[in-house]
Image: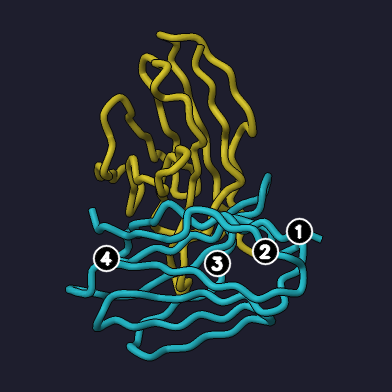
Amino acid sequence: ILNVEQSPQSLHVQEGDSTNFTCSFPSSNFYALHWYRWETAKSPEALFVMTLNGDEKKKGRISATLNTKEGYSYLYIKGSQPEDSATYLCASRNDYKLSFGAGTTVTVRA
Amino acid sequence: DVKVTQSSRYLVKRTGEKVFLECVQDMDHENMFWYRQDPGLGLRLIYFSYDVKMKEKGDIPEGYSVSREKKERFSLILESASTNQTSMYLCASWGGRAHEQYFGPGTRLTVT
């Protein structure tokens, strides 16, 4: 089991504000880092898969960075909107298995 | 679009009952997974299968078994349900050229 941690566990952000949160993972034997968004009553949806140190990925107002040497990834939401409210999961990949963090639940207040 | 479906969104069972959770994927993926998700904990892997009739224990297999008779279908079995198996259960599949796991919508199981 890979020890993947996410912080904070939850956060509230005002509509229009930007926010970010962290995923930390073991840096040894690193293969890939996955981010998923899980909205209530829906399936978790893949956001990003990152493999290289220094990787940055972007999808609309959401972006992520990766530091494999120190074992962390940040996910940023720029100009938060109510539809960004969800639980964001990160997972470290080992072969074809994923070890997930507990998630960061984001609530965007209108 | 990959589609992973699960047989029930909500299920209520009694302690001691045998429970079947079904998962079907339509993308011919080799690998299929069963997770459970509990508050404050990440998705924890129960079992996975990398081919028909093949299975491997995940991190928390106790109290569960699985069946994969056809490539598209992966079943999770609770032989004798207990209250500590009350949880959200998620199925996922992965294979071919996909870069990530695709998840079903989840089954919220309550054991009373």
Residue A12 place in picture, x, y as percent: 64, 58
Chain B display color:
yellow
Residue positioned 57% across, 41% down in the render: B106
Query: Disc 2 on helix, strand or loop?
Result: strand
Which chain letter goes with mark 4? Answer: A
Q: Distance between the residues labelled 2 and 4?
A: 33 Å
Which amino acid type corresponds to the residue marked 4 in the rendered image? Answer: Asn
Which amino acid type corresponds to the residue marked 3 in the rendered image? Answer: Ala
Local crowd size for mark 1, using a 10 Å CA cut-off: few (<14), some (14–19), many (≥20): some
Which chain letter goes with mark 2? Answer: A
Q: Earlier in the sequence, mark 2 or mark 4?
A: 2
Q: Distance between the residues labelled 2 and 1?
A: 6 Å
Residues at marks 2 and 3, common chain?
yes
Local crowd size for mark 2, using a 10 Å CA cut-off: few (<14), some (14–19), many (≥20): some
Residues at marks 3 and 1, common chain?
yes
Residue B31 place in picture, x, y as percent: 39, 56
Which amino acid type corresponds to the residue marked 2 in the rendered image? Answer: Val
Identify by letter the chain in cyan: A
Q: Contact (CB < 8 A) between labels 2 and 1?
A: yes
Which residue position is annotated with label 1? A109
Which residue position is annotated with label 4? A94
Q: Earlier in the sequence, mark 3 or mark 1?
A: 3
Does residue A12 appear to the left or right of B102 in the view shown? right
Q: How far apart are marks 4 and 3 (CA)?
A: 17 Å
